[in-house]
Image (cartoon, rainbow, N blue to C red):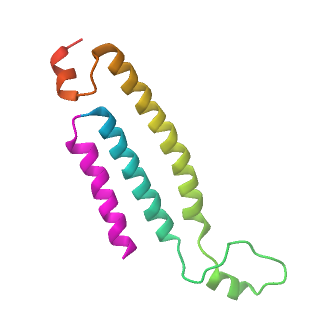
Amino acid sequence: MIWILTFILFAIGVYGVVCKRNLVKIILGFMILDYAINLFLILIGYRKGGIAPIISQNENLQEFVSKAVDPLPQALVLTSIVIGLAITALFVAIAIRIYEKFGTFDISKIKELKG
């Protein structure tokens, strides 16, 4: 069920990036798309009844491997969050500069102004 919701969230993000003409809505669509990808990566590493991937000296290695969740998707999501935040800040800075120069966030009007 959660896989379907992740796909729906991804589709909403793609719709916002591709179909909207306002720069703020495009940035919000990109953020939703980023969250959907992060959720997908988290779901890849999910294991029902899983334990944290931290091993102690007294544990049986076979039992630990069968129960532990995969730490790689968790690390990828943390990296993706930082990169997504930086890209979003860059998008917002560019949108502010475009608004200062053209006085609008509408892409179709910006194309007409040629400046």
Q: Nearer the viewer, residue 107 or 64?
A: 107
Picture layout, residue 103 above or below residue 46: above
Locate residue 13, reporting x and y percent: 31, 51
29 lies left or right of 19 = right
Which SS does the magenta portion mostly show? helix
Q: Residue at x 51, y 41 (%)?
A: 85
Q: Is residue 87 rendered magenta in the image?
A: no
Q: Is residue 12 rendered magenta in the image?
A: yes
Provide the residue span drawn in magenta: 1-21
Q: Residue at x 28, y 27 (%)?
A: 105
Q: Quadrant of the C terminus?
A: top left
Q: Quadrant of the N terminus?
A: bottom left
Q: Residue at x 51, y 37 (%)?
A: 86
- Which image quarter: residue 3? bottom left
Q: Residue at x 76, y 75 (%)?
A: 55
Which residue is the extreme one toward the top?
115
Locate residue 97, reporting x and y percent: 38, 19
65 lies left or right of 100 = right
